Amino acid sequence: MKALILVGGFGTRLRPLTLTVPKPLVEFCNKPMIVHQIEALKSAGVTEVVLAINYRPEVMMGFIAEWEPKLGVKIVCSQEKEPMGTAGPLALAKELLDDGSGQPFFVLNSDVVCEYPLKEMLDYHRARGAEATILVTKVDDPSKYGVLIINEYGQVQQFVEKPKEFVGDKINAGIYCCSPRVLERIELRPTSIEKEVFPHVAADGQLYAFTLGGYWMDVGQPKDYLKGLTLHLDSLNIHNPSALHNAPGVVGNVLVAASAKIGADCKLGPDVSIGEGCVIGDGVRLSNCVVMKGVEVGKHSKVDKCIIGWDSKVGSWCRLENQCVLGEDVQVRPELYMNGAVVLPHKEIKESVQTPNIIL
Ligand code: GDD
Ligand code: MG
């Protein structure tokens, strides 16, 4: 079975991290976002994954060279000459997705995390003979998502992308199971599956909704990425608790990569992930934060609700809070206070940042 992951888009809402790597390759819980997805696709029987890309192909090729053998799934690229939106890439990859067998395929937005109930979704899709099935979840603020009106049979009656007024709270979770016949509706041009394809499939009574159990988050912006971290670690705690770090000073759910070094008397957690090669000094306190590969945090620093990009160095006795996002290789001098600072890659911070700000 095949799957296509939409890995184009510029990921502007996740800057400055996406100045270093495309959004789908930003690590989430110590693995590139799409690795979580490819692992789930493999368990659901997918043997070939198409990555629909529109920029920096060389970075994606590097990803494939590293991960294809580790994951044991064939991964191919479908390269757009111009951004084709969320449906155009399906038309471009038509030959790759439809091998004539009539088998359905999966389509995923690259930035959604959940427990990926793909097998159940596929059974549901097949049982209804649907043209397309959308994974749906409920959220408190549906305005930034695609909203679905669904009847009692699970048929989608209406699909409204990013509605200005409240129409409902069941939203498109960004994962689809499609029968090849949906490809007949999609033209080879930049086009949106949410605005130009699904509303028509719904009008023909061919669009179904499969309700997601468990957590869900679109981690395409820092605040949601940190929320997603909490939810994902909660889920790990239920389904695979041995993956979590267990040591004195750990509070709640904490993920620590094998090669990370943790100093004495640290207080870690709740909701922290620490990447490979990190060095966390003595007496450091970390809560609800992501520390990417190769980061050093000096002794007695405190980091809360922040994302610290690859190979950055936070000096000792610093305090970082309120959704700071440090890009790759940022140096923060000792004893500084940073409140909601967004820092571009390769900067050195010499003074405290008292109010939320972008440091260019
Ligand atoms: N190949 C390719 N080409 N991919 C693209 C392009 C493009 O031109 N534009 C966007 N993408 C990819 C993004 O990388 C992402 O994986 C996916 O398409 C969706 O784009 P986002 O920018 O993340 O959209 P969104 O979060 O505002 O809304 C979408 O996701 C919501 C769920 O998280 C929509 O599908 C909503 O309906 C949905 O509720
Ligand atoms: Mg998104």
Image (cartoon, rainbow, N blue to C red):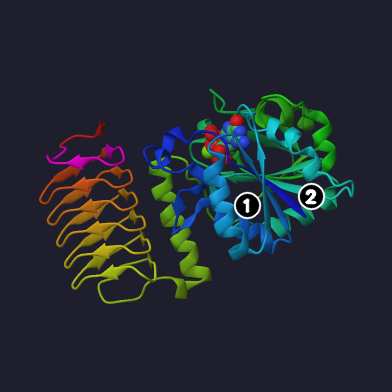
Query: Which is nearer the eye, 66 or 52?
Result: 66
Left or right of residue 317, residue 143 in this image: right
**SS under mark 2:** helix
Determine which of the numbered discs, if any, sits on residue 125 in the image: 2
Type of amino acid under label 1: Leu
Type of amino acid under label 2: His
| One can see residue 113 in this view | no
Q: Earlier in the sequence, mark 1 or mark 2?
A: 2
Q: Is residue 258 magenta?
A: no
Q: Which residues are magenta?
A: 342-353
User: In which quadrant is the N terminus drawn?
Assistant: bottom right
The quadrant of the rendered image in which ligand 1 is seen is: top right
* Looking at the image, residue 357 lies above or below residue 329: above
Residue 123, located in which quarter of the rendered image? bottom right
Query: Which is nearer the eye, 140 or 20?
Result: 20
Left or right of residue 139, residue 360 in this image: left
Q: Residue at x 43, y 44 (%)?
A: 224
Q: Residue at x 50, y 69 (%)?
A: 238
Residues tagged 1 and 2 counted as in contact (Cβ below 8 A): no
